[in-house]
Amino acid sequence: MLALRPSPVQALPRLSTPDTALWVKRDDLCHPEYGGNKARKLQHLLQQVVQAQPRRLVLVANAGSHQVLATALFARSLGLGLPIVAVLAPQPHTPHASRVLR
């Protein structure tokens, strides 16, 4: 299982009011290596990849895509020994996109 389910929630008492309690869903805690909603989505998709036994996995996304990064990370953690090819479309260069690409 890739994702911790359900995502934990946390109360934010300092941001709450007497009339309204504010809570946040902690998707960042879904997986110890790469939190977020990608773990839940990829859990099901990568199970289908394992069953299909393809020769390679091809992803199409923008440069700096978190989907590509998460797919490569989770495929490796599941022991999928197949090449992963990313077809990347250009997007505006930002420091964040550069970190994801690295």
Image: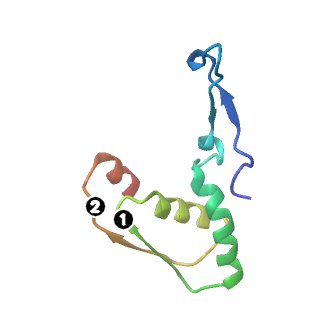
Is residue 2 shown left or right of residue 84?
right
The answer to whether residue 49 is seen in the rendering is yes
| Mark sitting earlier along the chain (1/2) | 1
**In the image, what residue occupies the spot 69% across and 44% down?**
7
| Few, some or many residues within 10 Å of mark 1 (<14, 14–19, 20+) | some
Residue 17 placement (x, y as % from top left)? 60, 15
Residue 3 placement (x, y as % from top left)? 69, 53
Query: Marks 1 and 2, how far apart in space?
Result: 6 Å
What residue sits right under mark 2 in the picture?
A: 91
- Relative to 65, is 87 above or below? below
What residue sits right under mark 1 in the picture?
A: 62
Rendered image quadrant of residue 44: bottom right
Please name the amino acid that badge 1 sits on: Asn
| Few, some or many residues within 10 Å of mark 2 (<14, 14–19, 20+) | few
**Furthest residue toward top:** 18
**In the image, what residue occupies the spot 67% across and 29% down?**
10
**In the image, what residue occupies the spot 60% across and 65% down?**
76
Residue 69 placement (x, y as % from top left)? 48, 60
Rendered image quadrant of residue 90: bottom left
**In the image, what residue occupies the spot 34% across and 63% down?**
63
